[in-house]
Amino acid sequence: MSDTHNQLRSVARIVELLNAAGVVHVVHTGDVTRERTLRAFAGLRAPLHGVFGNNDEREGLSRAAAELGFEMRANRLELEWAGRRIVAVHDPRDLDAIVLSPGDVALHGHTHRRTIETRSGALVFNPGECAGHLIGHNAIGIVDLETLLPEILRF
């Protein structure tokens, strides 16, 4: 997910959806915006990892992340899950400087538009807007790391 932009109602629904889906890890690709919004993710049953976006109040978010046991990075987050390299950035232009390999998963936000593409054999994914006011037009995504198939959850 990306770009929650301090929309607490959306965050509450996101937590419900991710918990119901039984996700193992959660990645936020930036623009949480404020500390209170990050704290609203405390109800997740999976650990949250993320990167800061261009609208984030980093000091408060860093403090909340430390208290909640969440991982937030400045520019780029790299993880390995299920034998896959997961790379998360906020701005998709930052992916241009990263060498992607087949089977990698590259996640980004910033554009508020859905991206599902293959680049150098890697999945590049942004589920799109999740902080809008129009019900049914918000979305988060889930990636099956075995098949690399993304799923869009609308709310």
Image (cartoon, grey):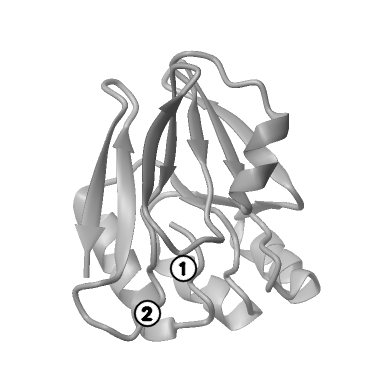
Disc 2: CA contacts within 10 A as few (<14), some (14-19) or many (>=20): some
Residue 38 coordinates in the image, percent (x, y): 56, 71
Residue 28, can we see it?
A: yes
Measuring 21% from the left and 64% from the top, which residue is drawn there?
A: 154
Q: Quadrant of residue 8?
A: bottom left
Measuring 37% from the left and 54% from the top, which residue is drawn there?
A: 114
Measuring 26% from the left and 83% from the top, which residue is drawn there?
A: 134
Tag 1 near tag 2, CB within 8 Å: no
Q: Please, what is the three-letter code of the amino acid marked with disc 2?
A: Gly
The residue to which callout 2 is attached is 132
Rendered-image quadrant of the C terminus: bottom left
Left or right? Give the position of 86 relative to 18: right
User: 118 or 27, which lies in front?
Assistant: 118
Residue 106 coordinates in the image, percent (x, y): 51, 35
Left or right? Give the position of 16 relative to 101: left
Residue 89 coordinates in the image, percent (x, y): 62, 46
The mark total stands at 2
Q: Secondary structure at mark 1?
A: helix
Label drawn at residue 26:
none
Q: Quadrant of residue 66?
A: bottom right
- The image shows residue 148, relative to residue 61, as above or below, that is above
Q: Please, what is the three-letter code of the amino acid marked with disc 1?
A: Phe
Residue 77, can we see it?
A: no
The residue to which callout 1 is attached is 41
* Label 1, label 2: how far apart the Cα atoms are: 18 Å
